[in-house]
Structure formats: C-alpha cells, structure tokens
Image (cartoon, coloured by chain):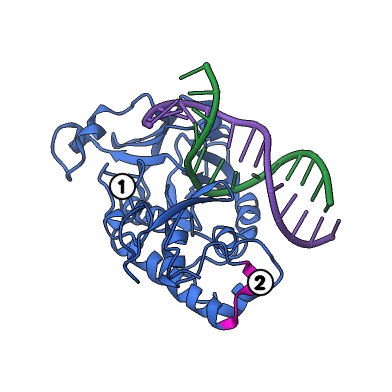
Chain colours: A blue, B green, C purple
DNA sequence: CTTCTTGTTACTGA
DNA sequence: ATCAGTAACAAGAA
C-alpha cells in the first residue's frame, strides 16, 4: 500500500534515473492502466518528477503532436509498482536489483515506458486499481485541488485539522485517511500515528480538543518522517524502483502486530474493522 | 466454491 | 446542501 513515504521513496530514486531521457515508446497491456493516448509519449522526455499526496506527476517536454502542457499522473493504489531496468542491469551489471526484476515484464506488468537509451520503466499492478493518466497541466491542477496539504507540508497546523474535525462525527481514523483533511496518510501510518498519539481510532472527530489535534499532527508527522527515513513499508508488495523492500514494516508501532505488545503500555495489540478497513490499535492506552 | 482484502470514488439515503 | 454509510472496482489469498 504505497502511502506518502513509499511514493516519496520511488520519486526520489526515479528522478535521477529518468530525467531528460527520451521516450522511445510506451507499451500498454491493460487498457484500464493507461488512460489517454499512449502514442503521444513517443519522442517526449520527462522534464520533472514530483509527488503530491500519493500521486506522482511526470511533466513531459513538448510532444510530437505539439502539446506543451502534458503530464503523466500516476496513482499506485494498493499494488502498483514502478520498476526501472536499464541495459546494464539486463547485462548483469549496473546498480544492484532484486532477482525478480530480471524477469520483467511479468503477468502483472500493465504498462512499459521504453527509453531511447535502452532502459524501461515497468508499471506492474496486480489488482489493476492503479492508473497512469495522460493529463494537461489544468487537469493535474484540478486533481491537486481536491487534496489538502501533504502531511509533510509545514503549512499544515493543528488549527487546519480542527476545521475538519470539529464538524464531523465520524471516527477520527477515517478523517486521518481522508485526503481532503491531510494528504498522504493511509492505513498503515494512520494506525501507527493514532497509537503514538494514544488516541482511539473510534474517537468521534469532533471530540478532539485543540491539544489532541496538535498531538495527532505531531504523531502523524513523526511516523511519516520515520517512514521516509526507512524508505517505506513493504507490507504487501510495495517495492523500490530496483525491486528492493522498504524497512518501516520492521518498526511499525501497531500495523501488522496483532497480539504483540504495545510499545506505549505493554498491552496486547488488537485488530478490528473500522469503516471496512483492518485497524490495529491498543485498546488499553488509546482512548 | 465463498468470503475477505485494499484506496478511492460514486452513489444512496437521511 | 451536507453528512454518513455502502457498493464498486480486480484479482488473489484464505
């Protein structure tokens, strides 16, 4: 489940690998995975890579048809991967990669973007919920406008959280994962942040005091920052662009730790469903 | 075989 | 209008 730290890890590594490389062609195996005319990519270059929330934006240089405002907007959803393979890797040299990267494309490869230097960027997505969209600058801006500031955006304050929490009665965890209050926090980091803040995932949002909101903001920033430092969490099938796993799953506070001891109080961690999502928490110290 | 899982959005009903 | 709850999406694991 790529959340902000996982997407940030991919973008940071990919930026240096694809910057200004000319695209030879794109290949699409699954039509749902690439929305737009993929032939437009031929001859263009990726001039800039950025992350917003859990989305990746690749700005394109002017295309053969004369468009100057095109971008690839990418959402990995739960099982999407972006894997970069170049000629040196294929020849058995180059930077280290996981073994399975050599067998791409696989049955889960939905799109491949081939560069003129012989490198290929594979978009693998087991469940086909993820997508790559060819969008204009205006369309990207529309997509961005639906998002609240990123959790790592310094402009985000406890007051800006309270604007949302004070008029909603839903469990706070649902709001934490709602990208219209704060962008980039998904299930893993929401569970962990609420444990660090010692707040119950079921606390009605409007019951949070200003102090609670500040505590929650600090906790979200802490766990997300730790996730970035450890280059993401590989819980299901998240992978770096070279096929390697992240490290956060080994330090998760509650996520995936049902029956193990809470780091705050030593009680055993529970798992229950909240709004249909698996939710890990400590019933003793999260109130 | 059925049920569950997952992030996000569309839809439904209050 | 606003809010809350649920279905839908796809494919694989249990």
**Residue found at the far left of this picture:** A93
Identify which residue is drawn at 55% across, 62% down.
A176
**Mark earlier in primary sequence (2, 1):** 2
Q: Are marks 2 and 1 on the same chain?
A: yes
Give the residue pinned by disc 2.
A206
Q: Is residue A196 visible?
A: yes
Going by the image, does A278 lie left or right of A115?
right
**Residue A1 image position (x, y, % from top left):** 42, 47
Q: Is residue A198 left or right of residue A244?
A: right
Query: Mark 1 sits on what residue?
Result: A240
* Residue that appears at 37% across and 49% down: A20
The chain letter for the residue carrying disc 2 is A
Q: CA distance from mark 2 to mark 1?
A: 38 Å
Question: Label 1: few (<14), some or many (≥20) within 10 Å?
Answer: many
Left or right: A202 as drawn, with respect to A282:
right
Region rendered in magenta: A204-210
Residue at 48 percent of width and 55 percent of height: A186
What x and y, as percent, mark residue A241? 31, 45
């Amino acid at each position: 489940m790529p959340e902000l730290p996982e997407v940030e890890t991919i973008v940071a590594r990919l930026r240096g690998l694809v910057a200004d490389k000319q695209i030879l062609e794109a290949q699409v195996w699954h039509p749902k995975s690439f929305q737009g005319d993929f032939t437009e990519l031929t001859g263009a270059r990726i001039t800039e890579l950025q992350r917003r929330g859990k989305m990746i934006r690749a700005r394109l240089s002017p295309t053969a048809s004369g468009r100057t405002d095109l971008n690839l907007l990418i959402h990995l959803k739960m099982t999407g991967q972006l894997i970069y393979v170049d000629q040196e890797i294929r020849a058995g040299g180059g930077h280290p990669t996981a073994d399975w990267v050599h067998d791409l494309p696989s049955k889960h490869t939905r799109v491949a973007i081939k560069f003129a230097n012989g490198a290929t960027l594979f978009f693998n997505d087991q469940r086909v919920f993820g997508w790559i969209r060819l969008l204009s600058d205006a369309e990207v801006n529309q997509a961005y406008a639906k998002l609240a500031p990123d959790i790592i955006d310094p402009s985000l304050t406890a007051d800006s959280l309270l604007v949302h929490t004070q008029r909603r009665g839903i469990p706070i965890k649902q709001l934490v994962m709602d990208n219209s209050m704060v962008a980039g926090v998904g299930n893993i980091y929401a569970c962990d942040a609420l444990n660090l803040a010692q707040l119950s995932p079921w606390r009605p949002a409007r019951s949070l005091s200003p102090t609670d909101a500040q505590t929650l903001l600090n906790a979200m920033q802490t766990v997300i920052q730790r996730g970035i430092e450890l280059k993401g969490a590989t819980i299901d099938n998240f992978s770096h662009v070279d096929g390697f796993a992240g490290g956060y799953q080994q330090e998760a506070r509650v996520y995936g730790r049902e029956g193990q001891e809470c780091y705050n109080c030593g009680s055993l961690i529970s798992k229950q469903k909240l709004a249909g999502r698996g939710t890990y928490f400590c019933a003793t110290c999260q109130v």
